Amino acid sequence: MAAVMTQEQSELSCVLIPLNAGNLLLPNVCVAEILLWRRIKNLKDAPDWCLGLLGWRGQSIPVVRFERLNKSTDEERKTGRCMIVMNRARSSDGLAFYALAAEGLPRMVQLTDDDLSNEPRKLGPAEVAVVKLGMETATIPNLEFVESSIRQLDL
């Protein structure tokens, strides 16, 4: 009798976040909360990628426009449709949360290794990779770059 070995495929729960010109793909554990667009307070002398500060759970957290931080040249709206409150990957110093401006409501996806393939493209400073997910492409952000940029803000 021959032994049949099966290979377990592990799945990763992810969130696909719509931006102006594409999607971000993040592990679901990175997302603390999804909010409809709210009024944000201007932050004096902030770089153009920081839209301002959002009052959230008794804290003021910066709102980041990923496309601007990534030096994208695509046209974009001044605001977004919703905000994705992010858990910091490295929260040992500074704020534990920040928000990303999104153009639409994110959706959950379950991924396996077989679901993704690399999409060759020149990457911006805030990107680690661009992947093909079915018929869509999605950017995997460089969260270390995003969070180090946020640490440089004068909050």
Image (cartoon, grey):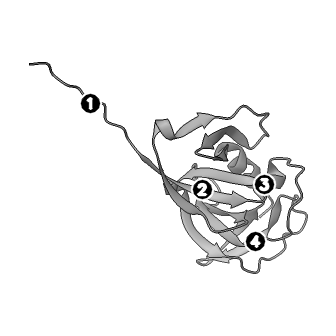
Looking at the rendered image, the disc whose residue lies closer to the viewer, 2 or 1, is 1
Q: Residues within 10 Å of mark 4 (few under 14, many from 20)?
A: many
Please say if 146 is above or below 61. above
Q: Residues within 10 Å of mark 2 (few under 14, many from 20)?
A: many
Q: Could you say which is closer to the camera, residue 30 or residue 36?
A: 36
- Can residue 54 be spotted in the picture? yes
The reply to whether dot 2 and dot 3 touch (C-beta < 8 Å) is no
Nearest to viewer (mark 4 / mark 1): 1
For badge 4, the amino acid type reads Leu
Q: Read off the residue under disc 2.
A: 16
Mark 4 touches mark 1? (CB < 8 Å): no
Q: Secondary structure at mark 4?
A: strand
Residue at image coords 63%, 65%: 84
Helix, strand or loop under label 2: strand
- Which disc, if any, is residue 6? 1
Q: Which residue is labeled 3 in the image? A: 21
Whichever of labels 1 and 3 marks the residue nearer the N terminus, that label is 1
Q: Residue at x 63, y 47 (%)?
A: 135
Classify the position of the N terminus by image quarter.
top left
Which residue type carries mark 2? Answer: Leu
Q: Which callout, 2 or 3, points at the residue further toward the start of the chain?
A: 2
Asked if one can make out residue 92 in the rendered structure from this viewpoint, the answer is: no
Q: Residues within 10 Å of mark 3 (few under 14, many from 20)?
A: some
What number is the disc on residue 53?
4
Foreground mark, 4 or 2, reads 2
Could you say where residue 128 lies in the image, as x and y percent from the top left? 67, 38
Disc 3, SS? loop
Query: Could you tell me residue 71's position as x and y percent?
Result: 86, 47
Q: Residue furthest left?
A: 1
Foreground label between 3 and 4:
3
- Residue under the point 14% across and 18% down: 2
Q: Earlier in the sequence, mark 4 or mark 1?
A: 1
